[in-house]
Amino acid sequence: MADPRDLMQRYCDGDAHAFRELYSLVAPRLLAYLMKMARSRAVADDMLQQTFLKVHRARAAYVRGADPIPWMYSIAHRTFIDETRRVKRAIVQNVGDEVPEVAASITGEAADVREEPIDPELSRAALDALAQLPEQQREAVVLTKLDGKTVAEAADIAGTTVGAMKVRAHRGYEALRKLLGVRPAEPRKAAGGTS
C-alpha cells in the first residue's frame, strides 16, 4: 500500500496521479465515517465531495511529512458539523420519525461484504441507540469502537484532548448500554477466594 504521506506530498506538488491514489486510499474510510455520522448515503456522499474540495483548497496548509489522514478526518468532521448546522437552520417542519436506511452494518463494513448474517433487529436497535446519543458522544463511539481509532487519533480528528475523548467515549458506551438494556459485566472473584 502506498504511503499517504508520500502521496499527499506528491499531490501538493501537482501530481494528479498521486491525488487519485490518495483518494482511493482514504475516500472509503472517510465515507464510512460520514455515513455513520450522517446516517444517509446521499448526505455522506455530498459531504465526502465537500471534504475533498476543502482538502484541495487547503493543501498549501498541509504540514509536509505529517500523516494526512487525521487532517482529512478533521476536515470531514468539520464538514459534518457545518452541514448539520446548515440543515438545522433550514428545517421548516418536521418530516416525520422515519430513519433513513444505512447501507453499512454497525461494524462499519459495507452491507454486501458481511460474512456472517447480522440480526437486522439488533442492528436497527444499535443504530437507533447510537442516533440518540449527544453528537460528541456519538462521534467518540463511532471513532473509537466502529472505526477502530485509538483515543489519541479520535481526539486529533475531533479537535479535542485525549482526556475529553476518553470521557465522551465512556459516557457514550454507558448511555448505549442503558439504551440497549445491557448490564455491565460483573467483576470476577479472585481464584481461591471464599464466598
Image (cartoon, rainbow, N blue to C red):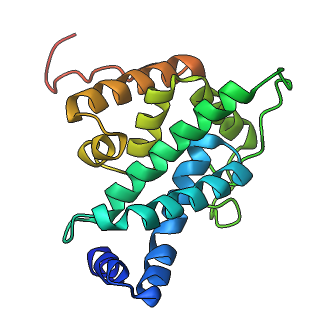
Q: Is residue 139 above or below residue 106?
A: above
Image location of residue 156, percent across then percent down: 28, 45
Foreground residue among 185 and 129: 129
Q: Residue furthest left?
A: 192
Foreground residue among 142 and 124: 142
Image quadrant in which the C terminus is located: top left
Q: Residue at x 40, y 58 (%)?
A: 72
Image quadrant in which the N terminus is located: bottom left
**Image position of 188 (left or right of 100):** left
Q: Is residue 13 above or below residue 142?
A: below
Can see residue 146? no
- Quarter of the figure with residue 172: top left
Can see residue 75? yes
Image location of residue 152, percent across then percent down: 24, 44
Image location of residue 164, percent across then percent down: 27, 27
Image location of residue 106, percent across then percent down: 59, 46
**Image position of 154 (left or right of 50):** left
**Image position of 127 (left or right of 161):** right
Foreground residue among 33 and 85: 85
Foreground residue among 175 and 133: 133
Q: Is residue 64 above or below residue 43?
A: below
- Give the number of callouts: 0
Q: Residue at x 46, y 43 (%)?
A: 78
